[in-house]
Amino acid sequence: MDHGCVSYGLKSVESADLSRFSVSRRNLTAAQCGGCCGCLPPCWFSSAPWMCGTSSGSLLWSCEPGASLKSVDITAEQTLTGRVSPHDIDMCHMNNARYLRECDFARFSLYIRNGVFKGLRALKASMVVGATTIRYRRALCIGEGFELRSRIVTWDDKAFYLEQRFVSTKDGLVCAVMYCKQSIIRSSPDKIMQHLCKRKVDCPEFPEDLQHWVNFISASSQALRAESGLEEKSK
């Protein structure tokens, strides 16, 4: 079965400022970003710090207009590097909510790099986070370096499922791992993949642990619908 798919990302350029991340945080307007994130309102770009993703330590993915296209694997893992700063901590280790914030930026960076935002815009679709789960295995302490590795694991008819890992650069331990259900609105992951790859792409199998989590989400949704009486109304 063919799970591979190559689409088009944005031009890689040398990065000179690697002060905290090996990516740049910029305040981009929608126009400056070339409209590649059409599913997000323009005000988001003018108010939020932006990180452009990197797929290797010295390369930066540019969002600037006129950047040439380069083929990328949509399901390839992206790695961002960071270091725990005094602004990230409580009790001398990284605050649990900070992990989720870093994952948010990393996902947006990934979607720009692998073309998913481009597909959303073309199909007039959008996306929201439907669910997340995170497991903390060992604290990242102040000053400790880490890699944040993000990838699309698989998808179904309604959502992409991503895995994001925080890996300590000190000893390579996976300090935290998160799964994210990225729900697609007004389209589907399959249509996005077909648009980007120009062909049908087979969905990779769900890993066992991810399937357990998806089953939990489904069971929770059914229970809440029954509790609110929605199941009876839909019959």
Image (tube, rainbow, N blue to C red):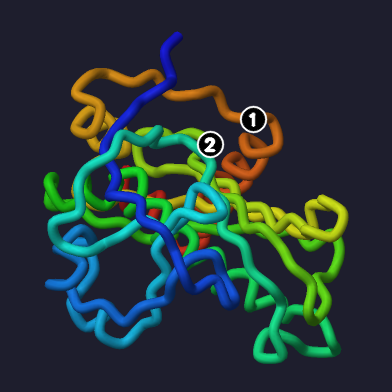
Which residue occupies 41% across, 22% down?
4
Is residue 26 in sight in this rendering? yes
Image position, residue 193 (x, y; %): 29, 32
- Residue type at mark 1 is Pro
Q: Earlier in the sequence, mark 1 or mark 2?
A: 2
In this rendering, the count of numbered labels is 2
SS assignment at label 2: strand
Q: Is residue 26 above or below residue 77?
A: below
Q: Nearer the viewer, mark 1 or mark 2?
A: 2
Q: Which one is nearer the viewer's eye here, 31 or 139?
A: 31
Q: Which one is nearer the viewer's eye here, 227 or 164?
A: 164
Image position, residue 106 (x, y; %): 49, 61
Image position, residue 231 (x, y; %): 41, 50
Q: Which residue bears the numbered disc 2?
A: 153
Which residue occupies 25% across, 37% down?
192
Which residue occupies 39% across, 18% down?
202
Instruction: Give the position of the N terminus as an image quadrant.
Output: top left
- Among the 4 quarters of the image, the one containing residue 37: bottom left
Q: Which mark is residue 207?
A: 1
Q: Residue furthest top?
A: 1
Question: For mark 2, does the 10 Å Cα neighbourhood hold few (<14), some (14 to 19), or many (20 or more) residues?
Answer: many
SS assignment at label 1: loop
Labelled pair 1, 2 in contact (Cβ < 8 Å): yes
